[in-house]
Image (tube, grey):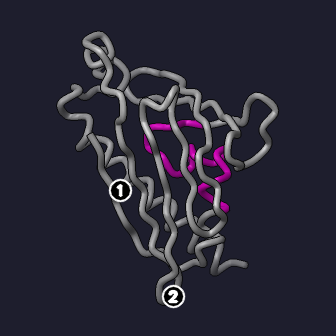
Amino acid sequence: MEGQVTIHINAAPDVVFALVSDVTRMGDWSPETTNCEWVDGATGPAVGARFKGHNKRKGPWNTKCTVTAADPGKRFAFDVGKGETRWAYEFAPAADGCRVTESFEIVKVPGPFGRWSTKLGTGVTWAEREGDLVHGMEETLRRLKAAAESDFTDG
């Protein structure tokens, strides 16, 4: 299961990278993640840095994530858990700003209990989850665009 969404943002790639890679602000963009915090001594985006994500839709759940790419202005990526899901943000220069692509890939499909419990946390069935995640990425990128363009034009 995988998906991706791309949006044009009127801000430089490094500006948008700085927003996305500050995981403590993820709750500002995501309709599912309420907040994140760096853990295990990490203080910012670097390969191997870990953070904890707090999520809530129908019910709450937490995830532990490990940064797998932190290339300013180019790519920010992380694995959830032990590589069950991979998330990435890629930044490409474009006229008047950049193109940002958010993507996910479910690498390890959960077992029967995990698929069943998806509905408890998210309110959607496992079969509906791919479309649900794509919709969430669309909302995330719209919010990110609004913040980046506001930050870019304000300062």
Instruction: Specify which label sits upstream in the sequence, 2 or 1.
Output: 2
Residue beneath disc 1: 138
* Total residue callouts: 2
Residue 145 drawn above or below residue 154: above
The quadrant of the image that shows the N terminus is top left
Question: What is the quadrant of residue 51 in the picture?
Answer: top right
Residue beneath disc 2: 96
Residue 113 drawn above or below residue 17: above
Q: Which residue corresponds to the image point at 46% horizontal and 29% vertical from the top-left?
A: 56
Q: Which residue corresponds to the image point at 48% horizontal and 32% vertical from the top-left?
A: 83
Residues at marks 2 and 1, CA–CA distance in whole angstroms: 21 Å
Q: Are marks 2 and 1 in contact (CB under 8 Å)?
A: no
Question: What is the quadrant of residue 17 in the picture?
Answer: bottom right
**As rendered, which of 93 and 122 lies closer to the eye?**
93
Give the magenta range.
Answer: 18-35
Q: Amino acid at mark 1?
A: Glu
